[in-house]
């Protein structure tokens, strides 16, 4: 994670957060953004993932990463209720109502952990990095790490 520490506000916080050039992170961030568009604004997934007129963040991905983003999105949408139930069971108290971005981030990571053949440690690590890059979610990075690590431990008992 790269934080710009050169310019600090009077609050002592960095002025901006830079997205690290970490393999796979751009794909997860795109999947998170597209999941939000589908769930929050009822935008068509097919339209967002169109190879010519799709979402700009999706179009910046190479063909291999686009395929991964579509697989993540398909799993997150197909198993939305299962993921939502599992997350709610793991949380001691519900996430704030305005934490839609955080919830989408958790859904993207959970889809990878529970339903895709992606190493669990990679899904957790990239989700924590994604949380740190978003100023809205940065304070929840530790929660994301703990929650997803617990999900990895408990998935054999929950999924057949």
Image: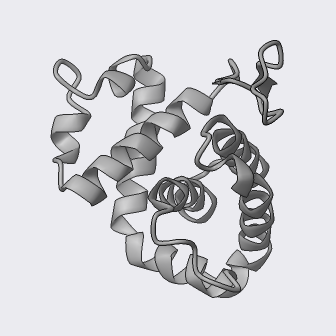
Quadrant into which the N terminus falls:
top right
Residue at 55% over, 57% down? 102
Question: From what the image shows, is residue 55 above or below residue 87?
Answer: above
**Left or right of 85: which side holds 9?**
right
Across and down, in percent, residue 58 comes to: 36, 27
**Left or right of 27: which side holds 74?**
left
**Left or right of 74: which side holds 145?**
right
User: In this view of the protein, can residue 119 be seen by the observer?
Assistant: no
Give the quadrant of residue 95.
bottom right
Q: How did the renderer colour the structure?
A: one colour
**Left or right of 89: which side holds 119?**
right
Across and down, in percent, residue 157 comes to: 70, 86
Residue at 76% over, 45% down? 125
Give the quadrant of residue 21.
top right
Question: From what the image shows, is residue 104 above or below residue 33?
Answer: below
Question: From what the image shows, is residue 13 above or below residue 112?
Answer: above
In this view of the protein, which residue sits in the foreground, 11 or 120? 11
Across and down, in percent, residue 149 comes to: 79, 65
User: In this view of the protein, can residue 14 be seen by the observer?
Assistant: yes
Across and down, in percent, residue 128 comes to: 72, 47
Give the quadrant of residue 25.
top right
Residue at 83% over, 19% down? 5
Quadrant into which the C terminus falls:
bottom right
Residue at 51% over, 83% down? 85
In this view of the protein, which residue sits in the foreground, 118 or 123? 123
In this view of the protein, which residue sits in the foreground, 119 or 80? 80
């Amino acid at each position: 994670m790269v934080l710009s520490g050169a310019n600090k506000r009077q609050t002592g916080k960095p002025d901006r957060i830079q997205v690290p050039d970490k393999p796979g992170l751009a794909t997860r961030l795109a999947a998170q953004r597209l999941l939000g568009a589908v769930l929050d604004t009822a935008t068509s997934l097919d339209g967002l993932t169109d190879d010519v007129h799709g979402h700009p963040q999706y179009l910046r991905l190479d063909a291999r990463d686009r395929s991964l983003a579509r697989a993540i999105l398909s799993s997150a949408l197909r198993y939305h209720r299962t993921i939502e139930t599992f997350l709610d069971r793991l949380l001691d108290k519900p996430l704030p109502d305005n934490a839609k971005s955080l919830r989408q981030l958790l859904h993207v990571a959970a889809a990878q952990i529970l339903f895709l053949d992606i190493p669990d440690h990679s899904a957790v690590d990239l989700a924590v990095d994604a949380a740190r890059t978003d100023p809205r979610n940065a304070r929840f990075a530790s929660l994301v790490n703990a929650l997803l690590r617990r999900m990895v431990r408990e998935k054999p008992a929950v999924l057949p």
